[in-house]
Image (tube, grey):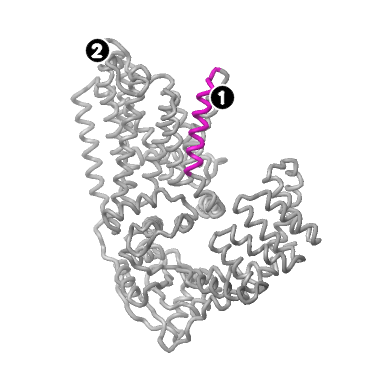
Amino acid sequence: MPAWDQADYLNAALNHGRALGWLPGGEWQGWGRLLDLSPKLPPAAAIAGAGVMALAGDSTDQASWVLSLWNGLLLLVTGCWARDLALGSQGTDRRGRLTLAAGRVAGRAVWLSALAMALTALLPGLASLRVTYLLEIPLTATCLLALWRLARWRAQPDWQRALLAGGSIGLAMLVKQSSLLVLTVPACWAALACWSRDRRWILRCQALLAASMTMAMVMPWLHHNWITALSGTTRATFTSAALENDPGALQLAGWLYYPTALVGQLGLAIPLAAVLGLALRLRLPRLGRNPGGRQVLPSSAGWRWFWLCLISGWLLTTLSPNKDARYAAPLLPLIAIGLAWGWWWLLQAWPRAGAILLSLVAAMGVSNAFVTTQPRRPWPVDAAVARARQAAIANTLVVVPSTPQLNQHTVSYLGTRAGGHTLGRQLGKTAEEIQPTLDGARQILLATGPQESVKHWASRLSDAVRTSGLFQRSGSWPRPDGGILELWERHGDAPIPADFATAFPQLARRLGEGSAGLDAVFSAVAIAHQLDGHFTYQSRVDATARSALLADPRDEDALWSLALLNVLQNRPAAAERWFAALEQLQPGNPWIPAYRAVVLMADWRMPAAHAVVVAGLERSEAEALLQGFADLTAVASGRLWRIPALIENLPVTTATVRGEG
């Protein structure tokens, strides 16, 4: 049974497969709908997972075949980079093919390549990630691919290699934003090197081509989702670090965090054998030579690049506030490549003993995988979700408990497999969610026994559901960890939940009140989206508002409804048009140009946003609200001399928006 994060990523793959028309229950609805599905994390890993689901199936075991594909890419790139380091620039021609003169060196390079792949496969820090549906294995594979392609381009520049380097960087960035921790310094280093005085102009053109390729791949997603991606990254990086009390960069524990974690990620046998090989290499200089006496070592340029990638990646990962051992996964293959040299020297000195030791390490790795495998215990979540799916074609199941095997993400995954449309959403975190849940929920999943992260108000919500008389228990199942899982459904004679579409126009109109209405609007929307995970109200709101505008083009309720609806749907261009229409009807309301400026900035139309705010300032005296927007849009449009004014006025505007001014 997948836990929170694993189920979340499985849901992403399912949703992308449906949006692409690859999986049952969905169809192609355009690029906008596809990009809507990746508001916080880029879509590359989800699309790859969707492709595997389309071919192999959508169960957890079937979907996990995608991890094998990513791991295959990881091993291939690890071997290729180790081979390049062993050969150096003298072992290949301009197209990267082996030369006849490098035949003897090539044999050693093959051994080093095989050792690097074997050690990467045996590292404990990567073993568990290969069978856990997370993003670390695809992130590691694509980051290593990007670094290797950059190394190839730097060693022997040409147009094809520049294009491949740029595409590889774009792919890594489309897997996860944290790829920037590993790629930023090497990519900038490689680009800046092209602008040194002794470089030809063609290298600069190749660098621009690589950068253009990266931007072309990343920009469609980034333009569509940059606000939610930025806020999600901030929450995952800074908020999570604060909640988990992770050591910061100003603490010694922060700098020792990942070196300490390496003990468990590398084990003891693999690095100790490599250190022994290095000691033998220093003691016996003949180990570094081929039968002709020629050194078989990394080229100095390749070795410097290798250490730049490793050290810069470790440094930026350490500086990141949020700490977890698996965040260092992209660095482990680099370490494996370095350790492979020590193993090679060990095998050169003691061929039989080294081979036996390598076999023992492999055997320990295999036995450890069996030892750590836990027996599968049946969980009743799938049975409860199957019962809930019988109630309606598209329904939302409110999930109150939150455990690794019982949470809203797992319910959504089980509810949408095989063409299903049952979504899980969690409520019960605050007192304000109790009454709306009783008024609007149709199906609720409760539990007795351990409920992990569920706190006081969730228990109050569970008690309220059981005693309200509005719901009846339609099924119960024992949990293997103790307690009972319960499905509660609304009584047939209970009051029908109010349609959020009916209240939406008056709610949207409150946006005109400014800070007084903002909190009320988005608090209500947040709960409504948990009760209606399919957002079915939105089509009704849209149809009603457009019909009203046909009868009266000046209907303000309809205009506010369409403006807010397009904001919620992340359609800034359409939202701006409706706000512009409202501005014609209410020219003295300073909040409307503020909203127009925000959605124009979301659409990266900074000059237009600046013009709207300046015009709003001329019509009203709301300088506290609009001056900060004017300075912000001016700086974003290139007027950098407005930065001092921005620093002075933006806090005032922020306080006004929050209702503190």
The amino acid type found where label 1 is placed reads Trp
- Left or right of 550? Residue 7 is left
Place of residue 126 in the rendered image (x, y in percent of width and height, measured from the top left): 34, 42
Is 534 placed above or below 114 here?
below
Q: Nearer the viewer, residue 442 or 433?
A: 442
Place of residue 482 in the rendered image (x, y in percent of width and height, measured from the top left): 32, 69
Q: Is residue 190 magenta?
A: no
Q: Which residue matches tag 1?
A: 195
How many labels, in total?
Answer: 2
Residue at the image position 19 percent from the left and 30 percent from the top: 356
Is 131 placed above or below 333 here?
below
Is 299 placed above or below 566 here?
above
Q: Is residue 216 magenta?
A: yes
Q: What's the magenta region?
A: 198-217
Residue at the image position 73 percent from the left and 49 percent from the top: 631
How far, Cα to Cα, is label 1 from label 2? Answer: 41 Å
- Left or right of 356? Residue 446 is right
* Badge 2 element: loop
* Badge 1 element: loop
The amino acid type found where label 2 is placed reads Pro
Residue 520 can be seen in this image: no
Q: Nearer the viewer, residue 564 or 517?
A: 564
Quadrant of the frame with the C terminus: bottom right
The residue carrying pointer 1 sits among few (fewer than 14), some (14 to 19) or many (20 or more) residues within 10 Å by Cα, namely some
Place of residue 542 in the rendered image (x, y in percent of width and height, measured from the top left): 54, 71
Q: Nearer the viewer, residue 481 or 611?
A: 611
Residue at the image position 39 percent from the left and 19 percent from the top: 299
Q: Which residue matches tag 2?
A: 291
Magenta span dominant secondary structure: helix
